[in-house]
Amino acid sequence: MTRHFDILPLLTESGSTVLIEGASGTGKKLFTGAIHHLFPRWDTPFVAVNCVAFVLDEISDISLTIQVHLLRVLQKQA
């Protein structure tokens, strides 16, 4: 875990999107909180997203407005 925290300054300086993966109880929330705290816009709201909650097989059930927003996010961050 110490090695992971050593790269935090590089992550926050890059300004890129970060995907955190890991089993339950491995400190993902702690790590993302540390990234947010060191980020230049630390005073902005932090929004954690549980990606398991996205069921893309059922994308047609989501409103068209949300589909457009999701597509923009995926295109912009990819």
Image (cartoon, helix red, strand yellow):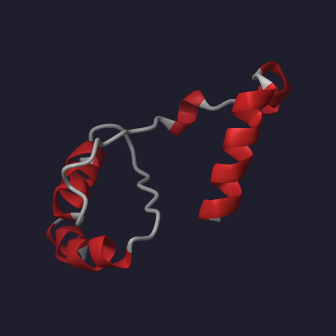
Q: Is residue 50 above or below residue 72?
A: above
Determine which quarter of the picture holds residue 8: bottom left
Q: Is residue 25 above or below residue 65?
A: below
Task: Name which quarter of the figure residue 68 lies in.
Answer: top right
Q: Which residue is situated farthest in the right direction here?
A: 60
Q: Quadrant of the C terminus?
A: bottom right
Up the image or down, 76 lies above or below 57; here it is below
Residue appearing at x 80%, y 28% in the figure: 64
Residue 67: percent from left, percent from top: 75, 35
* x and y percentages locating residue 40 in the rendered image: 23, 66
The residue under the point 20% across, 47% down is: 30
Q: Position of residue 37 (x, y in %)?
A: 17, 56
Q: Which image quadrant for residue 75? A: bottom right
**Which residue is found at the position 60% from the left and 62% from the top?**
77
Give the vertical position of 59 relative to 13 (above or below): above
Q: Nearer the viewer, residue 53 or 42?
A: 42
- Of residue 77 and residue 4, the one placed in the foreground of this image is 77
Left or right position of 21 against 3:
right
User: Is 61 or 55 nearer to us in this picture?
Assistant: 61
* Image quarter (top left, top right, bottom left or bottom right) of the N terminus: bottom left
